């Protein structure tokens, strides 16, 4: 369970998020809002990539400020651009990278990597250079690299923005099938169909918090 208590965040003198008190318990949570409304900053608070200048974020009681490493084991993060995340020469090595400090043996790592590559449809590419994958395959690889660490929550910051329709569907299909909690930041409101809860940000404030249809109506009102 991720909780935010009295959270505000500023970059320099600029307040980009204000007064957030939230408990994120639902399995599928969407995050929408205009450019610059604070969505990415909010997403990054959830696993300690950003530490709030006021208040605290905890994951199962662990503070992102003091327990960043433990928190990041529980909360995985997928960036918009997989090139920010894909770091090793081959597909299999890249997935194994996330397991390097887990104390797992080499055969255990190889097993886990093989099963994740199979699940994400990348098993035929295990020894291929990661940089030669298509955009959609790279995003799947980034997702596989996070999922191999078995996080309880996956935070995705516009993971389909750079993808064509086919690849976006592929990635969304994989996300939809995950048993884990997913927090999805997106500008594509149709992706939030079936989500339990949608947070609408506006100028750094939480302007609406509720089911998708009402959230989308609230978002449209804000933009009108
Ligand atoms: N590292 C940073 N240093 C300074 N200002 C930042 C930094 N990151 C974000 N900001 C500012 O914080 C505000 C919120 O940015 P954020 O990226 O959270 O918004 P967003 O809703 O995700 O936007 P978009 O939809 O364009 O991705 C913006 O005004 C942005 O310029």
Image (cartoon, grey):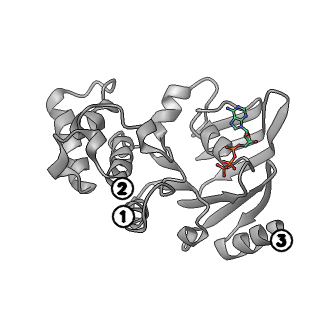
Give neighbour class at mark 2: few <14, some 14-19, many 20+ (Cα, 10 Å): many
Give the class, few, some or many, for how many residues have Cα within 10 Å of label 3's Cα (few <14, many ≥20): few
Which of the two discs, 2 and 1, sits closer to the camera?
A: 2
**Precedes in sequence: disc 2 or disc 1:** 2
Q: Mark 3 vs ligand 1: CB under 8 Å? A: no
Quadrant for ligand 1 reads top right
Q: Earlier in the sequence, mark 1 or mark 3?
A: 1
Residue 28 at x, y = what percent? Answer: 54, 61
Q: Which residue is mark 2?
A: 136
Where is residue 189, by image quadrant? bottom right
The residue closer to the viewer here, 3 or 90, is 90
Q: Secondary structure at mark 2?
A: helix
User: Which of 182/79 is in front?
Assistant: 79
* Residue at image location 19% in from the left, 27% down from the top: 105
Q: How much space separates mark 2 and mark 1, taking CA atoms?
A: 8 Å
Depth order, front residue of 204/27:
204
Residue 210 point in image, percent of width and height: 71, 67
Q: Which residue is mark 1?
A: 170
Query: Within 8 Å: ligand 1 and the Cβ of disc 2?
Result: no
Left or right: 221 in relation to 34 = right
- Marks 2 and 3, the one that precedes in the sequence: 2
Q: Residue at x 52, y 50 (%)?
A: 156
| Residue 165 percent across, percent down from the top left | 43, 68
Marks 2/3: CA–CA distance = 34 Å
Q: Which mark is residue 224?
A: 3
Mark 2 and mark 1 residues within 8 Å of each other at the beta carbon: yes
Label 1 residue SS:
helix
Q: Contact (CB < 8 A) between labels 1 and 3?
A: no
What residue appears at the point 55 percent right and 27 percent down from the top-left corner?
68
**How far across and how far down the image is residue 123, in percent?**
18, 50
């Amino acid at each position: 369970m991720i909780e935010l208590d009295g959270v505000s965040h500023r970059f320099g003198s600029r307040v980009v998020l204000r007064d957030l008190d939230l408990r994120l318990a639902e399995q599928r949570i969407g995050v929408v809002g205009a450019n610059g409304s604070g969505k990415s900053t909010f997403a990054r608070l959830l696993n300690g990539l950003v530490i709030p200048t006021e208040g605290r974020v905890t994951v199962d009681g662990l503070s992102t400020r003091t327990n960043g490493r433990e928190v990041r084991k529980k909360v995985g993060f997928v960036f918009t651009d997989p090139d920010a995340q894909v770091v090793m020469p081959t597909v299999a090595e890249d997935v194994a990278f996330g397991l390097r400090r887990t104390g797992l043996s080499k055969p255990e790592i190889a097993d886990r990597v093989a099963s994740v590559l199979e699940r994400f449809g990348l098993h035929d590419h295990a020894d291929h250079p990661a940089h030669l994958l298509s955009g959609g395959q790279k995003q799947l690889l980034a997702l596989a690299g996070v999922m191999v660490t078995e996080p309880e929550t996956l935070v995705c910051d516009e993971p389909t923005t750079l993808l064509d329709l086919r690849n976006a569907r592929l990635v969304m299909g994989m996300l939809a099938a995950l048993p884990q909690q997913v927090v999805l930041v997106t500008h594509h409101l149709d992706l939030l169909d079936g989500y339990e809860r949608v947070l609408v940000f506006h100028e750094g404030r939480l302007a609406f918090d509720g089911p998708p249809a009402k959230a989308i109506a609230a978002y449209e009102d804000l933009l009108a």
